[in-house]
Image (cartoon, rainbow, N blue to C red):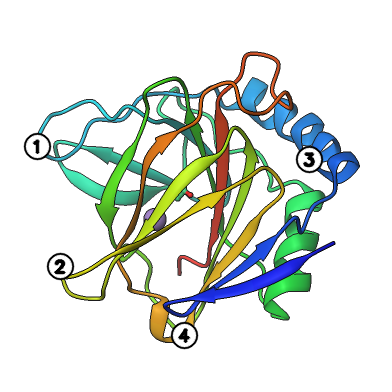
Amino acid sequence: MVTCITLRGFDIRKSYLDPTAQRDLVAALRGVLKAAPLFAPTTRFGKQMSVRMTSAGKYGWYSDARGYRYEPRHPDGPPWPPIPDEVLSIWRDTTGLARDPDCCLINYYGEGARMGLHQDRDEADFTYPVLSVSLGDDGLFRIGNETRGGKTESIWLESGDVVVMGGAARLTHHGVDRIRFGSSRLLPKGGRINLTCRVVD
Ligand code: SIN
Ligand code: MN
């Protein structure tokens, strides 16, 4: 059963994907990961991120010493593979938008990986939401404020949970403090996958 929770404007749909839909989505992502292998970006401060990532779609999110940006190609050279239909149907159903996303960022959290509090602000138009889909191990998702600092609230995101970050929450800081490595058996090697779909242009 899908349960909806609103936390600081984040629209959290627990158990949006049932176990079969989760497995189908992982199977579709396997093709993307084969064409566009995961890589570990560095922040603009030269520190390697603990999360490994890749993308599908017209653009992929990328980071190095030159800063955060969207790129039309994987660092190995080829264009990013198309966003799987399974992902597009979640986007269309949850956002109700006729405009499809330009980027599906795939983040992989292995044991010990985390993502610091940040805003998603490399896109041109913040009236479009960012859609997040969680698969595999549980992740402790922290939600802050639009400005840096202040009180935060956290919620465990589990496999199959979907979050729509839009409206007043579109520029709210968020991050993942830690994962519960081994809490799910969806991914054969464990860990957590988070997809975020973004309209970039
Ligand atoms: C992100 O903010 O890009 C990822 C969020 C998550 O992993 O749940
Ligand atoms: Mn983000």
How far is mark 4 from mark 3, CA to CA? 27 Å
The residue at 40%/86% (across/down) is 168
Residue 167, numbered label = 4
Q: Amino acid at mark 2?
A: Arg
Q: Amino acid at mark 1?
A: Phe
Instruction: Indicate the secondary structure of the residue bearing disc 3.
Output: helix
Which mark is in front, 2 or 1? Answer: 2
Residue 33 location (% of width, % of height): 63, 26
* Disc 3: which residue: 25
**In the rendered image, which quarter is residue 24 located in?**
top right
Q: Quadrant of ligand 2?
A: bottom left
Q: Nearer the viewer, residue 22 or 104?
A: 22
Q: Amino acid at mark 4?
A: Gly
The residue at 23%/25% (across/down) is 48
Q: Residues within 10 Å of mark 2 (few under 14, many from 20)?
A: few
Q: Residue furthest left?
A: 45
Instruction: Indicate the secondary structure of the residue bearing disc 2.
Output: loop
Q: Residues within 10 Å of mark 1 (few under 14, many from 20)?
A: few
How far is mark 3 from mark 1, CA to CA? 34 Å
Q: Is residue 104 visible?
A: no
Do the residues bearing badges 3 and 1 touch, measured as CB atoms within 8 Å? no
Q: Quadrant of the N terminus?
A: bottom right
Residue 104 location (% of width, % of height): 57, 50
How far is mark 2 from mark 4, CA to CA? 18 Å
Q: Is residue 3 left or right of residue 166?
A: right
* Disc 2: which residue: 148
